[in-house]
Amino acid sequence: MAMNLVVVLAIVVILVGLLAALKIKSPTKDGSLAFQSREPFLSPAERSFLGVLEQALDNNYRVLGKVRLGDLIKPAKGLSKSKRVSALNKVNQKHVDFVVCSSTDLAVLGVVELDDQSHGREDRAERDLFVDEALSGAGIPIARFSAKKGYQIQEVRTKLADMFKITLIGSASTLPQAQEPTPPQAVLKSEPGSTPTVAQPEHMEMIPMCERCGATMVKRQAKNGEHAGKFFWACSTFPKCRQVVAIT
């Protein structure tokens, strides 16, 4: 009799444990689906390059991030049902980094991809080739930029203007074809007998990335204190990030 009681108690303990485990695994009381937040929407490198794109483009254009390829293109007419389904699966499972649109009607002007070291892998190379060919077939130009610590805004602006056939203020493509795109220069004062120093325009400067958070940095000038009048780089996310770099 005692043995039977022990067996019954053991079964009860096991059942209670199983019920508790099932309750823990169930995301909600009613068993409905549950979700949680993903990682940041853009990686630090993508967030930084978004700032570069926004500086390179003017108010006539907008930049959208993480756009599904299937929202930009669709299978061409005339495909069989099986090929159409296959094509839809391929484009719906892929995203592009950035899409440049007209600010007036959000018409798609081109796609921008930021390529880091992972794009050197064979699987990534195959993916990139598919995306390039798919966009090209749909008549959407794509501009690829290599991920790095700093970018020259003028170079980015010129490439976007050339690839997307758009007019950007300050880009070489806005100049008459017969002229050589020579940027304006200013000669700084120098000591007698020394070689004059040529000051490059600000848009030719290399825009650094914040080493602390990865955001784009902006050029500031100190207003007060012992460094009044001097220029420095400050993180564009200030006051969230207070990283500064002196300009020597």
Image: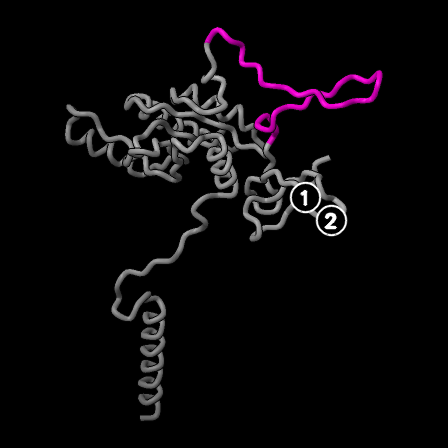
- Tell me if 178 is positioned left or right of 195 in this view: left
For the N terminus, give its image quadrant: bottom left
In what element is the residue under mark 1? loop
**Dots 1, 2 in contact, CB < 8 A:** yes
- Residue 168 in the image: state x and y as whole percent: 44, 24
Q: Is residue 187 magenta?
A: yes
Q: Give the amino acid at mark 1.
A: Ala
179 magenta-colored: yes
Residue in front for this viewpoint, 82 or 133: 133
Q: Residue at x 54, y 10 (%)?
A: 180
- The colour scheme is one colour
Q: In this rendered view, identify the residue nearer to me: 116 or 55.
A: 55
Image coords of residue 33 (percent x, y): 28, 60
Check the picture and name the quadrant holding the C terminus.
top right
Q: Which mark is residue 222?
A: 1
Q: State the SS at label 2.
A: loop
Q: What's the mark number on residue 31?
A: none
| Vertical relation: 23 (above or below) 237 | below
Residue neighbourhood size for the residue with mark 1, other residues' Cα within 10 Å, grouped as few (<14), some (14–19), many (≥20): few
Q: In the figure, residue 37 lies in which quadrant?
A: bottom left
Q: Residue furthest right?
A: 193
Residue at 36% x, 23% y: name it: 141
- The numbered dot on residue 225 is 2
In the image, the segment drawn in magenta is: 177-206
Q: Is residue 18 above or below residue 135?
A: below
Q: Residue 217, relative to residue 158: is it above or below?
A: below
